Image: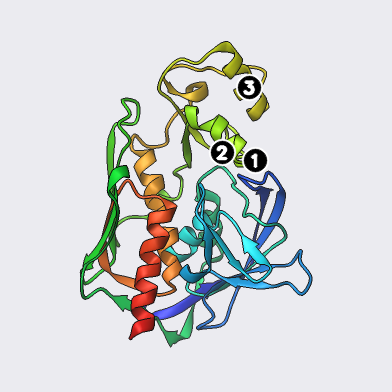
Amino acid sequence: MSQNQRTIGGPITFSGKGLHTGELVTMTVNPAPADSGIVFRRIDLKGAPEVAALAHNVCDTSRGTTIKSGKAKVATIEHILSALWTMGVDNATIDIDAPETPIMDGSAREYAAEIERVGTIEQDAPRNYFSVEEEFCFEIAKKGVKVVISPAEEYSVDVIVDYNSEVVGRQHFRYDSSVSYPEAIAPCRTFVFLHEIELLLKLGLIKGGSVESAIVVVEKPISDSTKKRICKVFGKDDIAVERGYLNHQRLRFDDEIARHKLLDILGDLALLGRRIKGHVEALRPGHYANTQMAAQLENKISDK
């Protein structure tokens, strides 16, 4: 990867529904000057207030990462950040006309494809790096969550997931410079366990969810009344609910769950605003753990 900063080669626009709000949204990623970082601009609000994609702006991690600065708030930013940052974009201004990014098909595939289409442009400024010189760890022992970053010459991330699920099993995937993000990681969709859906709805989440934008893991049979409620949520007359994946969904990869968790952590750690030289090992990572690790590193930088 180039040692100079890069921006996107031209504007790219995406439209769809927000996963949790269900609101229609149009989002345009624009080129930006060197040293500006990745910034969201809420063009639907008076004065088009901005919020930088940085760890200290994280305000919520309920099934997604939300950032806020003043009146500007943007939710579920991890997928577009993952695609931009991992594909080499250091600087971009993202115009968005709603409080949440579009979920698309639950992955970053369309984001990656559009970034590839317009390409990136090298800028006349060196990249900012954070070289890991000591081990950093964030752990939630009772949940089996642990994220560790240790010294290494290059950036790499190992993700391991194990939810004690016979359907999902134990999965592992690794990202390093030899892995093609658009081919191996970007196509991997978000997921949810069927038994979590009603709780998420009670919390006011997944209003824009569908069987086209998420993998739904089914571990045991459900009642007819629950099945009817699930059909209503997804706008279907009927759905197949058998052990495995809802509606006989076919996975894009056998380890798609782990790969999606890797997609997420690549986006969340981009909130450091600097490229990392170090190795990340993440066991059952989630947005809270990921962003807490990014905040630790951000605090380390500010202390220097």
- Say above or below: 21 vs 181: above
Whether residue 17 is visible: yes
Whether residue 10 is visible: no
Q: Identify the residue shown where x is 47% and y is 73%.
A: 90
- Say above or below: 111 vs 9: above
Where does the image place residue 145, in percent across and percent down from the top left? 31, 48
- Say above or below: 264 vs 87: above
Contact flag, marks 1 and 2 (Cβ < 8 Å): yes
Dot 3 alpha-carbon crowd within 10 angstroms: few under 14, some 14 to 19, many 20 or more: few
Discs 3/1, front: 3
Q: Identify the residue shown where x is 64% and y is 54%.
A: 100
Q: Spatial distance from mark 1 to mark 2, Cα to Cα?
A: 9 Å
Q: How many marks?
A: 3
Residue assigned mark 2? 213
Viewer-side residue, 266 vs 76: 76
Q: Spatial distance from mark 3 to mark 1, Cα to Cα?
A: 15 Å
The N terminus sits in image quarter: bottom left
Residue assigned mark 3? 229
The amino acid at mark 1 is Gly
Residue assigned mark 1? 208
